[in-house]
Amino acid sequence: MARYTGPVCRLCRAEGVKLFLKGSKCNTSKCPIVRRAYRPGQHGQARHKVSEYGLRLREKQKARRFYGVLEKQFASYYDLATRKAGVTGERLLQLLETRMDNVIHRLGFAPSRPAARQMVKHGHFLVNGRRVDIPSYRLRPGDKITIKEKSGDFVKLQLAATPTSKVPTWLTVDPVAMVGTMNALPAREEIDAPIREQLIVEYYSR
């Protein structure tokens, strides 16, 4: 699958918010969005008038980049969310939050979502005892994530490089045994993503 391989800090500056794509660097004064709090490019410091359409487009792009999802896959998630019972925007965020790579990052096993995606693709994790190497694999309540025996030392190094953060209440983790469990689907108030999902719904409903 195609994947953006350019400088990720440009994405944060383009959206005007930290997307936490560089792990520990995002929490230091070296973060580019702290040092240059304006859009990248030659005209980055110029005034930009954003239309109603542009506002909704930017919110959709921000969500895609925050979770590391490409356009076609994101549209598929939205289509699936519309077919689920409940609020479409909240269902969309639940689908994104329960991706394997996001859960690995939320548990603190990886310093960023891109790092978590790479670790999953390299087969370092097991779900309910079975090896899973698909970053978009959707976890369900009750699923238990463990680390492959041969990967223990490598994951410990990643844990040491991971900024200390609070594990959300819909997950539990045993940092000593390095075992994580998904307890339930996340409620909207338990998702700290800087995303206004209603604008995304309006974008696709236009």
Image (spheres, grey):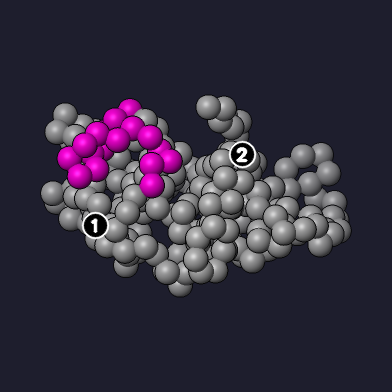
Instruction: Confirm whether residue 33 shows in the render.
Output: no
Q: Which sits in the foreground, 79 or 99?
A: 79
Type of amino acid under label 1: Gly
Graded by Cα atoms within 10 Å as few (under 14), some (14 to 19) or many (20 or more), the crowding at tag 1 reads few
Which mark, residue 142?
Answer: 1
For residue 11, what is the image quadrant? top right
Q: Circle 1 sits in a helix, a strand or a loop, which is it?
A: loop
Q: Quadrant of the C terminus?
A: bottom right
Type of amino acid under label 2: Lys
Marks counted in the figure total: 2
- Measured as percent of width and height from the top left, residue 45 is found at 80, 50
Magenta: predominant secondary structure element?
Answer: loop
* Residue at 53% from the left image edge and 27% from the top image edge: 1
Real-space CA distance between mark 2 and mark 1, rounded to the nearest whole angstrom: 29 Å
Q: Which sits in the foreground, 152 or 169?
A: 169
Tell me the residue that label 2 is attached to: 72
Q: Earlier in the sequence, mark 2 or mark 1?
A: 2
For residue 128, what is the image quadrant? top left
Q: Is residue 74 left or right of residue 188?
A: right
The residue stretch that appears in magenta? 122-138
Graded by Cα atoms within 10 Å as few (under 14), some (14 to 19) or many (20 or more), the crowding at tag 2 reads few
Q: Is residue 40 left or right of residue 76?
A: right
Decide: is 181 above or below 120: below
